[in-house]
Image (tube, rainbow, N blue to C red):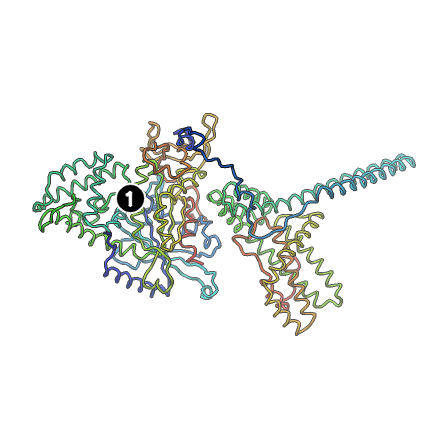
Amino acid sequence: MREPIARSTSRPVEPEEVFREPRAVPPTAVQRVEPEADAFADLPVLTLEPEPRFKRAKWLGRLLWGAMGLIASLALGLAADSLIRELYRRAEWLGWVGLGALALFVLAALALAIREAWALRRLHGLEHLRHAAAQVLVSDQPDPARAIVQQLSAVYAGRADMARARTVLDADAATLFDGADIVRHAERTLMLDLDARAKALTAASARRVAVVTAVSPRALIDMGYVIFESLRLGGTIAQLYGARPGFFGSLRLVGAILAHLAVTGGILLTDGFVEQLVGQGAAARISARLGEGFVNGLMTARVGIAAMRAVRPLPFAALQQPMVRDFIPELVNLTKGTGSPS
Amino acid sequence: MAQPPTIAVDELGIALANLRDAASGTVTPTLRLGVTGLSRAGKTIFITALIHNLLTGARLPGFTPAADGRLVGAEIAQYPDKAMPRFAYEQHLAALTGHQPVWPDSTRRISQLRVTLKYQSTRFLKSLGGLSTLHLDIVDYPGEWLLDLPLLSLSFAEWSADALERARRPASTREAEAFLAALDALDPLRAATDTGAELLANGFTQYLRLSREDGRALSSLPPGRFLMPGDLEGTPALTFAPLPAQTQQVRRGTLYALMEERYEAYKRIVVRPFFRNHFARLDRQIVLVDALRALNAGPEAVADLETALTGILACYRQGDGNPWTRLVSRRIDRILFAATKADHVHHTSHDRLEAILKRIVADASRRAKFAGAETRSLALASVRATTEGTLEEAGETLPCIIGKPLAGETIGGKIYDGVEEIALFPGDLPANPDTVLEPGNPVRINFLRFTPPDVTTRTSDGVAVLPHIRLDRALEYLIGDWLR
């Protein structure tokens, strides 16, 4: 039985107000200093890595697209209207059928749009979370960190595979008092498993790409396959981290992945540069196609890593980001089979 | 003139012991963790909680080896020094997690424990051999004894001047009255008698005891063994008292000469071995500071605390060593200053508590950094006795803590019985840490002591989980890098 007695002991006193005596001095004794803007206030909080953000269209572009959309909608509306009228003119029942079909179409389109918007929001939410987490890692404030944990729990609320991790995180976050600790703990508990699975998916994809490239008769086929596999990999990884992208979400994801590749491609390239040269040289000596397969496989691995960085809701702080070189053994062991497509 | 705390023979002994450790350390490295804190700073609780959390592998999310799953396990091992009592971990834990949890009694004697940690290293070469092992040696001792360390560099005359100045302060008139009267009645230059010396020493001990019970003077009153004599009670080495400085030549056989001789004997027999065996060879140090109790007692107590800590920490060997010098000379390369009992304030006040702690240990910390050691400060609670909440008072929302105050704790005229649970807003800590040292500042805060928490959560193995605040962060800082 708890019977908390709420009792204020000493009234909260603002120390500054109490400890400072009021005093008056002649103005000549005062050195006037203009308030100076804090030089550090505007500096952006350093994130752990340079990350490209989704760019929003400028207002001119928005105007253009908006107007165009309006015209298109008007045209569509007009077309639909005249179609229905025409149908009614032919026969009453035909008109009703047409109207019904139109209503269904509009309903379905609306549902789809809502789903897309939802997916986009989710993707955006993950990105937002990542930035917030990167800031907390620097600022070490507990309250935003708890908010992040709550949002993460919401993101993964429907996931049976993460039930245990969620429970552990919720219980432990209450015992932690430092923002950075909370975020790092969240990363360890929630992301560890997801990272491993994303890595496995990437490895399997890379291996498939390498094999297809090695055996495909035409360059066009393996190019197509690389693109197909990359898209699929990006989608799967996004789903794994809780993004569930729809069509537009996927487009945005592809954009983000490409942006990541552009920014970090250099880093990822140099990370395994020597191994790549050696591997490629050795593989190419055996067979030119095998060498190409190796390169394409590494490319896919890079796409997988970029996708992870694009959709992971927390930055890599406590855990290590996978490197391209981690996938080289997988690619070298092509004989082990292509792995089952997931 | 300040004397060095050790003599040449000690140095040789320390170097040899280090060499021996280094030899055995090639197989299993040993990390000696120094837990420093005045009496009632929470040393015993800290050690108990630390061992318990390591043994059970319970809630340590901020401790990387445990969070990464690399810490395989820990167990209590045989301590190599067979002449020392073992730290009564089981009894302390039973007290904390019993049906009616109580805080362990204050430490009355020295004890030690060795915990062996098994972990998987992340270093390539180390991880080749499978699991690695690390011994963690911890010593617990009465905090009063710590006050003796500064005596090592003080002569009898210096110490006497200091002690008498303290006794004559207006604040301690009541406690010191009897002793000062006895002192005035004696002529130090007369021939000494055992009874006279005993009488004076008793008066002095009584004075020390009274001022400790008073609680205002924050135990910065050496010699510590007078308060916690252990098995030396009544020996000549513990039967002396400070005497006023003499202008004439002091002849042998006088009371002054006798007292001086006993003072030196006290240093030789009691203090120096204690220092040599336990403090001269440490790798890491945590300094537990009960800042809240001092804040409760007022600026004088805070100033006392600062003086005591600075004096004590000056005795330690801090600095950055390299693997070669470490063979013969161990130095503390990381010091963690911890404001204990952080659960007595709401977590929004932890920043201010840390700022106050930094102010209190500023001198000690500066000295350590100059010597090359790393320092950090944080607010922690080894065992968290409260939960947090908010309370509405006159339209204002106040952050408060919820817990059961110990029986006898009192606030606003009400005395608690140790059963009732209350929500307490202890008052705001000052934003400017300097104000806590300004004499004459009224006390605007009131912290209560709480009973230990009821154990409500257990691990899957059925072991009680002791809640804590930032114990994992402290561990990470103190031993985390040894477990890489």
Q: Which of these two is toward me, A229 or B220? A: B220
Picture quadrant of residue B428: top left
- Classify residue B141 as left or right of residue A45: left
Q: Taking A212 as reference, is A233 above or below it?
A: above
Picture quadrant of residue B416: top left
Q: Which of these two is toward me, B2 or B9? A: B2
Q: Which amino acid is tagged 1?
A: Ser
Q: Which of these two is toward me, A144 or B158? A: B158
- Classify residue A333 as left or right of residue B48: right
- Classify residue A286 as left or right of residue B389: right
Q: Helix, strand or loop at disc 1?
A: loop
Q: Chain of mark 1?
A: B
Question: In the image as oriented, which residue stretches furthest toward the bottom?
Answer: A285
- Classify residue B388 as left or right of residue B114: right
Q: Taking A101 as reference, is B269 above or below it?
A: below
Q: Could you say where residue B453 lies in the image, as x and y percent from the top left? A: 39, 40
